[in-house]
Amino acid sequence: MNDSLDDFFALLPAPAEIGAALSCRVLLRRGLEGHPFPGRADEAQAARVAVLTEEALRGTDRFHLTSLSRVSSLDRRAAVERDLVPQAFAVQGGGLLAFGKESPVWCTVNETDHLRIRAEAGGSDLSAAYRLAAETDAFLAESLDYAFSPDAGYICAEIADWGTGLSASATVHLPALAMAGLVDRALRTALDAGLSVRGFWSDESASSGALYELETPRGAWTDEESILVHLGDAVERISAYEKGAREELLVHDPESIRDVVCRAYGTARYVRRIGYDEGAETLSRLRLGTGSGMLAGFEGAKAARGFYTLRNAHLLKYLARPGQPEPPDASDTVRIEEVRARALRSLVAEATIVEVP
């Protein structure tokens, strides 16, 4: 019998309904004293680390534990789409995954480091995400002997991560800046602050749905507070730029927003087949319409969730539920595009365009 990740998927925080910042995440990397890291360990050494870490995780009574070999291939693919685990870790199948019973915090064992602790929060609440990860770290430190040097800090598998072992990221949605052609200028703020920026999920374009991930660089700052403050400040400034761009368009050219929102609404209502990139762009414009007061009956959080749920594995998981038609094969692009179109139509079933007096 396969273990299901559905309960943990349900614990993940809803993306923010309004504002540019959708969600944020922190990652803590830890090594165990006296044990070679996974890239150098043989099977017996890796198994010993897994046993020690599993005992520590069970001792907290805060996690469900499973081997990825017991998780269905579809759940593993959905976990990769949701960025819970990297694809290489999911493919190898035998890794240990621990996910919170009551909170959005999860751990992987023998990924690249011996232990990686991740936590997520909605919006730009980095302090909440860090608090979850740090609490787990403190509990585990009571029974695990972390590799630590007074001079170098936490010893990780890669030297660039030594020190705090912490990195953080935030996902931002910038549709108004994209319309105004100002995304690159706004993201320069993050680059100037030393952060890295990448587009999100796109198969064909720079970024699907005007989504971008801002991430702290490895080893750039020496304490946890500096890492979180640098990222938080950049997210706040970029969010202000996005708000300013939307307000500028609403004052000087509201019909440009109304045009893209109405086109997106028409697509979502009547589309019969749609690829992921076009679906994400449609959701992006619908969320812009909600934030601009041009679309009613469609919460911004619903659009933000759609950025995940329109991905292939998530669609197949939905169709695998009892009472649903037999799901298409993962390689059946046409049927998947038809299912995605159906999901998009259901998202806007109660939405209406707000007419101008």
Image (tube, grey):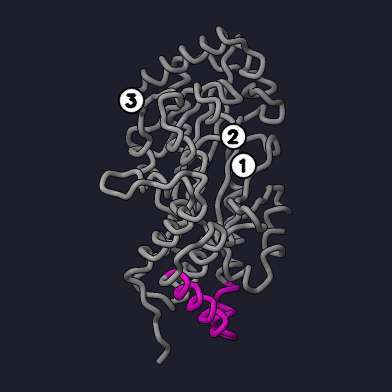
Q: Amino acid at mark 1?
A: Ile
Position of 293 with respect to 47 (left or right) is left
Looking at the rendered structure, the secondary structure element under dot 3 is loop
Q: Nearer the viewer, mark 3 or mark 2?
A: 3
Q: Secondary structure at mark 2?
A: strand
Q: Are marks 2 and 1 in contact (CB under 8 Å)?
A: yes
Relative depth, front residue between 249 and 309? 309
Residue that numbered label 2 is attached to: 166
Q: Which residues are magenta?
A: 244-268
Q: Nearer the viewer, residue 114 or 74?
A: 74
Residue 133 image position (x, y, % from top left): 47, 34
Determine the CA span between mark 3 and mark 1.
Answer: 42 Å
The residue sitting at 62% across, 35% down in the picture is: 223
Question: Looking at the rendering, which quadrant does residue 241 occupy?
Answer: bottom right
Q: Is residue 109 above or below residue 119?
A: above
Quadrant occupied by the C terminus: bottom left
Which tag, 2 or 1, sits closer to the chain's start? 2
- Residue beneath disc 3: 1
- Give the residue type at disc 3: Met
Residue 303 x/y as whole percent: 44, 61
- Say whether residue 132 is visible: no
The x and y percentages for residue 18 are 45, 64
